[in-house]
Amino acid sequence: MSFTTEVKAEIAMNELHACCAKAQLSALIQMCASLSLTSSGMAIEIKSENANTAKRILKLLKERYQVSSQLSVIRKMKLKKNNIYVLRVNSQVAHILKDLEIMDETGLKPHAGTAMVRKECCARAYLAGAFLASGSVNSPLTANYHLEIAANSKAQADFIAKLMRRFDIPARYIKRRSQDVIYVKASDKISDFLRCIGASDALFAFEDSRIQRDFMNSLTRLDNCELANEMKTISAGKKQLEDIAWLETYRGLDALPKKLYEAALLRKQYPEASLNELCDVYQEQYHETISKSGMKHRLAKLKELANQYRNE
């Protein structure tokens, strides 16, 4: 079962107040249904590839309007060969569409009115309905965080994006073939959306995977940083040893000033030690405190002398 299916299964089981059920059903019908005219009058045909979405629509229609609907299942013959669940409603069609603010005297509307989603709980229910209808979210186990809802029109997409902004979830818009898609890629905002639509279990699973991934990424960055620093230390030590070897061969270390002589001996003794480690050893051997910058200065002076003697 995909993560999207798990999220939809969870929110399809949530209990709703009457006002919220109306808002959710409005989003579901508007985004999943098509209106047709027959010799018997108007009919609503609702299609969904998700069984939980189809069950949710059927349940809400029965509870609110006491209508019976014809249910059929169509098997797709291409690609994934999924089932398509089709609900057909033939009675009270005009009443349903007007009650859900999908149709008025002027015709069909691109989205519900603002009055329907004025209450925060209703706005959450509407967003849950939109996700049930045509939403998807990548599994948190993948490296790419992505949540999207495909709308039927630009106006509908703008309406959903506006509702998401009410909950501090900034959604972006893209036109993909014949669909108007709004999407979120920030992992923390995807978490906010799951919390908003009432997918608590999915939220915990998403956050757990996200935290584990971020933790492992942090460890990897630290390991890479430590490795880079270690390689840098080894490279610097190698160059310093070359300078000291040149001075020892052609000038002799005894000719160096006392402080430079001590630094040269320490570097020969500990070729892969960092500056901090050299400072600690220096304090143990010579019973004198030296700072990291002081040790760095002495090693730089050895390099300067070696270059000077080379030029001469």
Image (cartoon, helix red, strand yellow):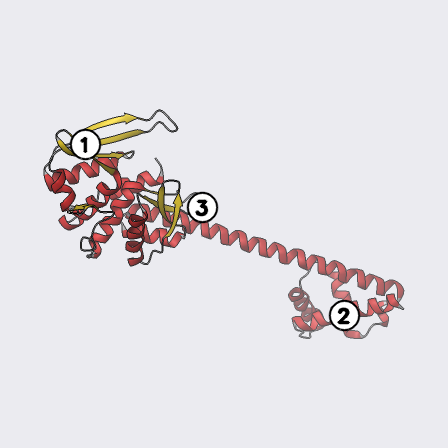
Looking at the rendering, in which quadrant would you find the C terminus?
A: bottom right
Dot 1 alpha-carbon crowd within 10 angstroms: few under 14, some 14 to 19, many 20 or more: some
View extreme (front): residue: 106
Residue 262, numbered label = 2
Sequence-first disc among 1 and 3: 1
Q: Position of residue 191 (x, y in %)?
A: 35, 52
Q: Position of residue 29 (x, y in %)?
A: 22, 41
- Helix, strand or loop for disc 1: strand
Q: Residue at x 23, y 31 (%)?
A: 86
For discs 1 and 3, the disc positioned in front in the rendered view: 1
Q: Residue at x 19, y 29 (%)?
A: 71
Sequence-first disc among 2 and 1: 1
Q: Is residue 32 left or right of residue 140?
A: left
Q: Position of residue 219 (x, y in %)?
A: 51, 53
Q: What's under tag 2, amino acid-wise?
A: Glu
Dot 2 alpha-carbon crowd within 10 angstroms: few under 14, some 14 to 19, many 20 or more: some
In terms of image quadrants, where is residue 241?
Answer: bottom right
Q: CA distance from mark 2 to mark 3?
A: 54 Å
Sequence-first disc among 2 and 3: 3
Looking at the rendering, in which quadrant would you find the N terminus?
A: top left
List the residue tagged with mark 3.
Answer: 144
Residue 88, numbered label = 1
Q: What's under tag 1, amino acid-wise?
A: Arg
Q: What's under tag 3, amino acid-wise?
A: Asn
In terms of image quadrants, where is residue 74?
Answer: top left
